Amino acid sequence: MRHIWQIIKSLWRNKWGFRIASTYLLLLLALVLALPLLPLPYAPNFLDLQHPFLAPFTAKGMAAGHPLGTDGLGRDVMANLLFGARTAFLISLPVMLLATFIGVALGTTAGYFGDYAFRKPLHNVLRWALGFLAFLYYGLYLPLKLHQLNMGMKTLVMPIGLLLFTLLLLWLLTSVLLRRFLLWQRLVAIPIDKVVMRLIEALTSIPRFVLILVLASFIPPSLPLLSLLLIFTLWPAAARLSRAEMLRIKQLPYFEVARSIGNSPQQLIWRHALPNLGGPVLIAFSFGLGGLLALESTLSFLNIGVPTTLVSWGRTISSIRGNTSAWWLVAFPGGFLSLTVLALYTCSHYFSQIFGSRNGQ
């Protein structure tokens, strides 16, 4: 992390393009964080039905408190711009962080262990496999279903209790099998690389946008469900990059030396592999974040998988359907979206120049 921070400071001093892009992103992030303190005249979902499609920078708009105009329902464009930026960051940042974390974890594990190096007792494999299925059902599916039905937070105690009971029952069952049958102590090789690569190929064989459209048609509009859906479709990119980098790092001399002196697999991955993965992962993260911002706005524009009350730049742009001459409904949110994506791609471009040249040496 210290090495990456030194590179960022060097780019800030020497590259004016990186300085402008990062300054814009920091100012936008500060504006999003300070948004609750700003004295905005209207809430983003307030309907001023007396002033629909009010043009920006007009005397009537200034007098009514809408300096950037309104949409067809009288919603203030300025408030929707600012709250739309907050929505974009609140969705994109956590989703991209979780997708990158899952992808890096699976990719580095698959790249290091391959198909035969990771060996575990059979009873542990059975315990973890059944426990994972129980977590998917009791830990994810049931809580989301109860949240969809507005059952309240108290009802979440039931699936959590069932999950803990199931895990305890699995532990007792495998312990009994272990004592009675020596077969369950046999070590088996887990083909992690093959499993991860087949999952990546299955998810990337279908265009991401088409896959999201298909999956979103089966779920009700919900922000948590949309976030899980985006994470499910975004992690393969980070996993494939991490796996390729892990295979490269395994062949480097310093890694061979660290392995020869007796470092454990956990030490090799955490201390020697992951620090060298930081640069490529940072590039992929910034590129992916820009694409995710555009994807979130597209889904909001099409009203797919998101609640109609969600404030976003895509929803503001979609308001132009009621009046194609209301140019401000596209110019302002579209301009903010384009500048934000351009700033993220600019930072990624400079990161790729630095880390690409270092890896090539």
Image (spheres, grey):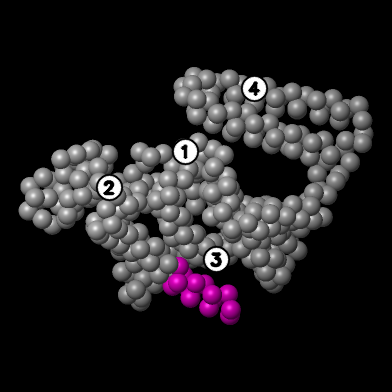
The three-letter amino acid code for the residue at tag 1 is Pro
Q: Which residue is mark 2?
A: 80
Q: Earlier in the sequence, mark 1 or mark 3?
A: 1
For marks 3 and 2, give the CA distance: 35 Å
For marks 1 and 4, give the CA distance: 27 Å
At 35% from the left edge and 63% from the top edge, which residue is drawn?
A: 338
Q: Is residue 32 visible?
A: no
Q: Is residue 21 visible?
A: yes
Mark 1 or 3: in front is 1
Q: Nearer the viewer, residue 242 or 275?
A: 242
Q: Nearer the viewer, residue 283 or 332?
A: 332
Q: Is residue 124 left or right of residue 359?
A: right
The three-letter amino acid code for the residue at tag 4 is Leu
Labels 1 & 3 near each other (Cβ < 8 A): no
Callout 3: helix, strand or loop? helix
Q: Which residues are magenta?
A: 347-361
Q: Earlier in the sequence, mark 2 or mark 1?
A: 2
Mark 2 or 4: in front is 2
